[in-house]
Every structure is written in structure tokens, then in C-alpha cells.
Amino acid sequence: MAYTLEEFSADCHRILKVDPGAAGREQVRQKLEKLLLEDDFIAANCGPDAKGGANVLYADAELGFQILAHIMDKGHEGGVHDHGASWAIYGQAVGHTDMTEWKRTDDGTAEGRASVEKDRTYRLERGQAGIFQDHKIHSIAYPAGARFIRVTGVDLQTIARGRYDVAAGTMAMDKRPNFKGAA
Ligand SMILES: [Fe+2]
């Protein structure tokens, strides 16, 4: 039986309504991995003709989470950032993405300052999904043509998120548009 975007959206709603915490997110991550193996879903939302950028596939009016398709034409090594108070689940649809988690090495008390170092890096291939919990500092890198699906706890554009300058040892919190890939 095919697993569809509509079924996945309904599963996310049902799961996150009961448990919006780590256990519920893990269930969503596993459901996303199942969806990513559906060729019909990939063809409809992540195919060669998909619109570039960040496309909202589903937004839950009650719980606030979103499902987005990120369609990347150019390869890119993204900056170090966090999603503030929201979690995000990244699942690979086409190509691969290298996910790097960073950890702070300072105590976070100096305004605008942050020392971070790489903690671990892992690669997502098609059908694999990973979670960045709220406030987790991370960066991603992917080759040209990569496509991934993200489920975010809220519309990320509505909340302040951190950006880190590793070399300068600084960080800033701001609201910004959804990541649309390298220009
Ligand atoms: Fe991110």
C-alpha cells in the first residue's frame, strides 16, 4: 500500500497531539522515512521539475507544525545556526545531505558571544531522516540537485533563531525567511 502525503500529515497530527516531545518526534521521524521511500511522493513533490526553494506542503492549523519540501539546484555548505525554540526533522528525498551538530564550549553568559565546535557529522541518504531538537546548533551541506523534506515544530519564520560566526566567536538571534538554498 502506498503511503501518501495526506496520510503522513494526518499521522503527524495524531502523533504530535498526543506527544509533542521527543518520543512523538521520533515517531514522526520514522513515518517520514517511510514516506521518503514512496516514488509517487518523490515524483510529485521533489522531481526534476519541482519549484526551487522552500515549498510548504502542509501547515497544521491546530498544532502549528509544517511540512516543507526544500528543492536545491546548487550545492551549498550552509552556515551554523539553530532553530530557537523549535525542533526540525530533516529527511532526504534526492541526493544526500551532510548534517553537522555543533556544541558550545563557552557558558553562554556573554551577550552576542558564542564559542562552538563540531560535535559530530553524519550523512543522510534517501529514506533517512534526522532530528535537530530545539536549540540544537547545526549546519548542513549538500550537492547540487539535493532535495529534502523538513518537518518543523512551527513556522520557523515566526520565531527568532540563532546564527553563529564560528571564526569570530559571535552569535545573533533574529527572525528570517525560510532557507531557500544557495542563490
Ligand atoms: Fe536548520
Image (cartoon, rainbow, N blue to C red):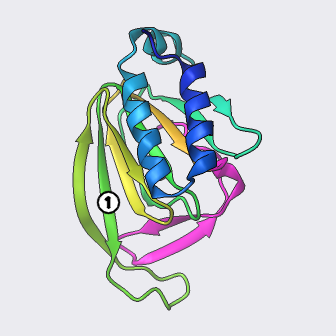
Where 123 sits versus 138, above or below? above
Residue under the image location 34 percent in, 27 percent down: 144
Residue 107 coordinates in the image, percent (x, y): 41, 89
Whether residue 170 appears in magenta in the rendering, the answer is yes
Where 119 sits versus 9, above or below? below
Specify few, some or many for label 1: CA neighbours under 10 Å numbering under 14, 14-19, or 20 or more. Answer: many
Residue under the image location 47 percent in, 40 percent down: 28
Q: Residues in magenta?
A: 154-183
Give the side of residue 155 with respect to residue 20, left or right: right
Q: Amino acid at mark 1?
A: Glu
The N terminus - image quarter: top left
Q: Nearer the viewer, residue 132 or 32?
A: 32
Residue 66 shows in this picture: yes
Whether residue 72 appears in magenta in the rendering, the answer is no
Residue 48 coordinates in the image, percent (x, y): 44, 11
Residue 55 shows in this picture: no
Per the image, label 1 sits on a secondary structure element best described as strand
Q: Which residue in the structure is indicated by mark 1?
A: 101
Q: Residue furthest front?
A: 18
Q: Quadrant of residue 145?
A: top left
